[in-house]
Amino acid sequence: MVWWKKNNPDPIDLRSKALRSQLSRLEDEINRLQSQVDRPEATPKPRTVGSPQISTPVHPISSLPKEPIFEPVDRLQNKSEAQSLPAHYNDLGVRKYDPFSAWRRLKTFFRGPASTNPKLVTYLAAGSINGLRPLRYEKRVARNRFILLSIFFVIILWGILTMIFKQS
């Protein structure tokens, strides 16, 4: 019976199909505009009485810079190290020990990078996307698996140690 079947479309697949169709439309428009730029104009240019002007066609590829353009990346630069003051160095030029900044570096090391898409993270954590389990459920499964394997290895280690000490 059809009534009992769940026929919910996957929102991620729907979105990917919509993005693919939009991408194909944009590629068609790019090809159309490129063909307009490449072909010469069909309308005649009006003549002027003055001296003839020689026009050279300007292609969009030749106007591009030869060197690559790099964008600044802030996540790779350590902002705490950039604030280097003379008060941070002793008389010999060696940097003084700063426990507060060391603690901050240690915390950022274990925290990891920030999310680039926080809205997606909240959707995944709450389980708002149909067909995907929430992250809290996945964390619970992983935690229970870790606990079970830890107990299993402790029992094996205990058995090995009892066999070693019984022989001696």
Image (tube, rainbow, N blue to C red):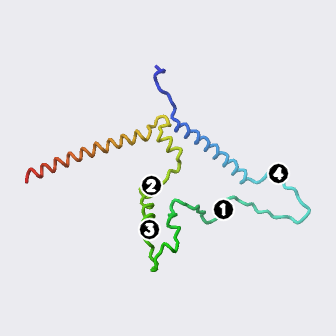
Badge 1 or badge 3: first in the primary sequence:
1
Look at discs 4 and 2 and give the one toward the viewer: 2
Q: CA distance from mark 4 to mark 1?
A: 28 Å
What's the residue at 62%, 42% (across, down)? 22
Disc 2 or 1, which lies upstream in sequence?
1
First of labels 4, 3 by sequence position: 4
x, y percentage for residue 2? Answer: 48, 21
Which residue is labeled 1 in the image?
A: 64
Q: Check the image and report above or below for 58 versus 34.
A: below
- Mark toward the start of the polypeptide (4 vs 1): 4
Q: CA distance from mark 2 to mark 3?
A: 22 Å
Which sits in the foreground, 101 or 35? 101
Say which of 96 and 45 sits in front.
96
Q: 10 Å neighbourhood of mark 1: few (<14), some, or many (≥20)?
A: few
Relative image position of residue 96 (x, y in whole percent): 44, 72
- Given this view, does label 4 or label 1 mark the residue nearer the observer? 1
Query: Tag 3, which secondary structure?
Result: loop
Report helix, strand or loop for mark 2. loop
Q: CA distance from mark 2 to mark 1?
A: 38 Å
Q: Give the number of the disc on residue 43.
A: 4
Residue type pointed to by label 1: Leu
Amino acid beneath label 3 = Asp
Q: Which residue is mark 3?
A: 98
Q: Give the amino acid type for the residue marked by disc 2 in the picture.
A: Gly
